[in-house]
């Protein structure tokens, strides 16, 4: 990527973005790659929800508060990710091109991994947290934010419509070694 000469806050290192729709397997892939390569994982969605708990200026209704935080997402994402002192970091939860672009400018390297799974396959998977809207409604909202453009930016794409074991094996055998070759060490 090589943005450092233009952006004074840029650091040597690589951000590994694991992107996809809800329940596609982003967290599983990020966890495995992190374990295999000894990299920290930052989940922007979890970090935003944590921020929501500590902001008294936000509305009490969780969905309204989250909408305000999402409007601030690119700057919050930069703040959250820069708290890690590691040069190479795995990031999940990027759903819009602006956040992807803003974060990309903070490191000299970038790898985007898209995890794809059908709505039917994702519907059979458990939720990590209680969410009131359907997967189809979330997909529509995330597409409106630009998730399709983020997915299109991927250098690595994985289909995750089979078993969990098969998916984990693909990530370990194929994806982690490919990512390792692209890291700035």
Image (cartoon, rainbow, N blue to C red):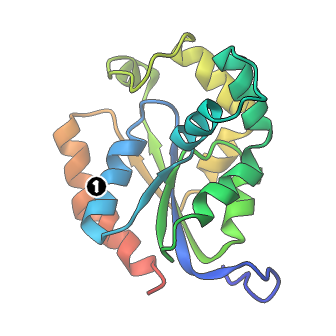
Q: Residue furthest front?
A: 56
Using the rendered view, name the quadrant where residue 37 is placed.
bottom left
Position of residue 163 in the picture relative to residue 4 (left or right): left
Residue drawn 47% across and 73% down? 88
- The vertical placement of 67 against 28, above or below, is above
Position of residue 181 in the picture relative to residue 5 (left or right): left
The image quadrant where one finds the N terminus is bottom right
For the residue pair 133 and 130, the one nearer the viewer reads as: 130
- The vertical placement of 134 against 157, above or below, is above
Position of residue 23 in the picture relative to residue 9 (left or right): left
Query: Which SS class for mark 1?
Result: helix
The spot of residue 25 in percent (x, y) is: 38, 39
- The vertical placement of 132 against 96, above or below, is above
The spot of residue 152 in percent (x, y) is: 63, 50
Using the rendered view, name the quadrant where residue 6 is placed.
bottom right
Residue drawn 63% across and 81% down? 11
On the image, numbered disc 1 is attached to which residue?
32
The image quadrant where one finds the C terminus is bottom left
- The vertical placement of 92 against 128, above or below, is below
The spot of residue 26 in percent (x, y) is: 42, 43
Residue drawn 51% across and 73% down? 85
């Amino acid at each position: 990527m090589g943005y450092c000469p233009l952006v004074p806050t840029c650091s040597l290192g690589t951000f590994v973005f694991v992107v996809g729709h809800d329940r596609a397997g982003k967290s599983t892939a990020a966890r495995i790659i992190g374990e295999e390569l000894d990299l920290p994982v930052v989940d922007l969605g979890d970090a935003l929800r944590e921020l929501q708990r500590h902001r008294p200026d936000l509305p009490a209704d969780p969905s309204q508060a989250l909408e305000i935080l999402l409007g601030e997402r690119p700057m919050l994402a930069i703040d959250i990710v820069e708290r890690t002192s590691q040069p190479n970091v795995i990031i999940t939860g990027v759903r819009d091109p602006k956040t992807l672009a803003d974060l990309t400018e903070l490191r000299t390297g970038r790898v985007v991994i898209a995890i794809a799974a059908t709505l039917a396959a994702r519907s059979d998977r458990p939720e990590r947290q209680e969410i009131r809207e359907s997967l189809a409604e979330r997909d529509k909202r995330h597409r409106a934010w630009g998730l399709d453009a983020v997915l299109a930016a991927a250098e690595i794409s994985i289909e995750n419509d089979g078993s969990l074991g098969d998916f984990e094996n693909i990530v370990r055998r194929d994806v982690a070694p490919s990512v390792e070759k692209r890291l700035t060490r």
